[in-house]
Image (cartoon, rainbow, N blue to C red):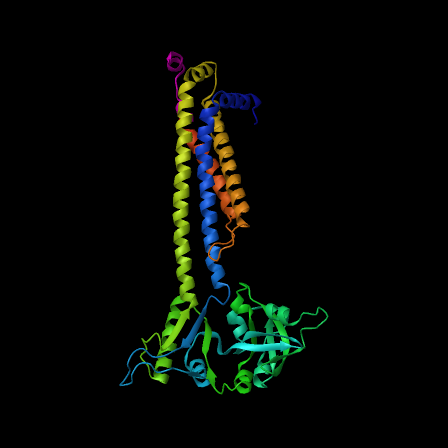
Amino acid sequence: MFDLDKWQEIFSTIKKNKMRTFLTGFSVAWGIFMLIILLGSGKGLQNGVEQQFASSATNAIWFWTGQTSMPYKGMQPGRTVRLRNEDYQLIENRIDNIEYGSPRYDMWNVTISFRNQSSNFRLRGIFPEFFQIEKLTMVDGRFVNQTDYDQYRKSAVISTLVSEALFKDPADEVLGSYINVNGVPFKIVGIFTDDNSRDENMRMIYIPISTAQRVFGGANRIHQFSITVDGDAATSVNIEKSIRAEMARAHRFDVEDKRAMGSWNTLEQYTKFQQLFAGIRLFIWIIGIGTIIAGIVGVSNIMMIVVKDRTREIGIRKSMGATPWSIISLILQESILITAFAGYIGLVLGVGLLEMVSGQIDSEFFKNPEADFYTAVSATIVLVVSGAIAGFIPARRAAAIKPIEALRDE
C-alpha cells in the first residue's frame, strides 16, 4: 500500500543530503550510460562489417584464375590459367552441396548508348542463378532468366545508375527500350539496384553469359565463377578445397598455388567475424556490468552510512512499535528510488547520444550504432533489482538494531 508519509520522509532525507545522493546516483547513471554506449558502439561496428557482406550472399565462394607461381611436374611457373565452360560443368557434376552457381564473362569499359546519350560501363555475362549470389534488388522488370540463356537472347538488366545516365528524358520508357552495347542492340528487361550502392557494382549491365560469349567473341571462355554453399562454414571450406583440387588437376598446377587460382570464402570469413563480435559483446557486457556493480556497491555503502546516521531515529521508531519490515522497507525504497532514477537518467542519456550521433556517422566499418530495446529494458530491470539488493543489507542491519542500543548511539 502506498504510504505518503514514508515517501515524504524519503524525499526529505534526500533533500538534506543532496551532494551525497547526487554522487551516489551519478556512479549508477555513469555505469548504465557506459553500458549503453559500449553496446551501441559494438552494434555500430557489427552493422558496418555486415554491410560489407551485404553486397552478396554470405554463403558464397568466389573463384578466379591468374598465372602459376610454382613449378609443377616439370612445367615452369608463369603459365596463364584460363577457365572454360567445361570447368564449371565439371564442378556442377562432381561437387555436392552447391546451392546456386554461376560462371562470369566480364567486359570492361564497354560503350553503352541510347539515342544521343552514351557512356562506358561494365558488362557481365552470367547465369540466372547469379541473382541469388549477388543479392540484387530489382527495382522494375525482371532479371535474366533461363529462356534468355537457352535462346541466346539479347536481354539486358541495367542498374538505376545506368538508367539515370542514359535516359535523360523523363518521358522515355526504360523497360522494353533497346540500348546499344558496342553497337549491338540489347533489350532492357529489368532495372536493379545494389544494397551497398558501391559505384563498381552500380556501373554494371547484366546479360546472359551464352549471349555474351557468342556476340562478343568469348567462345567458351569464363573469367570467374561463384557458388553458394548449402551447409555451414566447415562444409564451405571442404567444398573450396575440393574445387581447387578439381581445377588443379584439370589445368595442371599445384593445388597450393594461390596465384594460379584465387578464391574468397565469404561464409568462412563471415563466420569468423560473427565469432569475433560474439567475443566483443561478451567483453562489453563484462566491462559494463563491472561498471554497474561498482555503482551498486557505492549505493550500498551510502545506505550503510544512512543507517549509521539515523541509528538513534531508528531506535526511537522501534521503541514506539515500528516493525522490522517497516524499517527495512524504508531503507529499501530509498535505495531503489536512487538506483532506478539514476539508472533511468543514464539510460536516456546513452540512448539519446546514440540517436544523435547515429545520423552523423557515415563510415564503411561503423554504421547505425544503436542499443537493443530489450537489452535496455533488461538492463533497467537488473538495475532496479540490484538497487533492492544494495539496500537490503543495510536495511537488515537497521532492522536488527535494538532500541536501547540505538538510543545510546552517539
Majority SS type along the magenta span: helix
Residue 201, compared with residue 308, is above or below; it is: below
- Does residue 155 appear in the picture of this structure? yes
Write down the region rendered in magenta.
Answer: 395-410
Quadrant (top left/top right/bottom left/bottom right) for the N terminus:
top right
On whether residue 127 falls in the magenta region, the answer is: no
Counting the numbered discs, the total is 0
What percent of the width, then of the height, locates residue 18? 48, 24
Image point (49%, 33%), residue name: 342
Q: Residue furthest front?
A: 116
Residue 85, compared with residue 100, is above or below; it is: below
Quadrant (top left/top right/bottom left/bottom right) for the C terminus:
top left
Q: Residue furthest right?
A: 171
Q: Nearer the viewer, residue 149 or 155?
A: 155
Residue 96, compared with residue 202, is above or below; it is: below
What percent of the width, then of the height, locates residue 19? 46, 25
Q: Nearer the viewer, residue 406 or 357?
A: 357
Give the quadrant of residue 309.
Answer: top left
Residue 127, compared with residue 306, is above or below; it is: below
- Does residue 399 appear in the picture of this structure? no
Image point (53%, 23%), residue name: 11
What percent of the width, then of the height, locates residue 382? 46, 40
Image point (46%, 58%), residue name: 49
- Is residue 138 left or right of 24 when viewed as pictured? right
What percent of the width, then of the height, locates residue 300? 41, 29
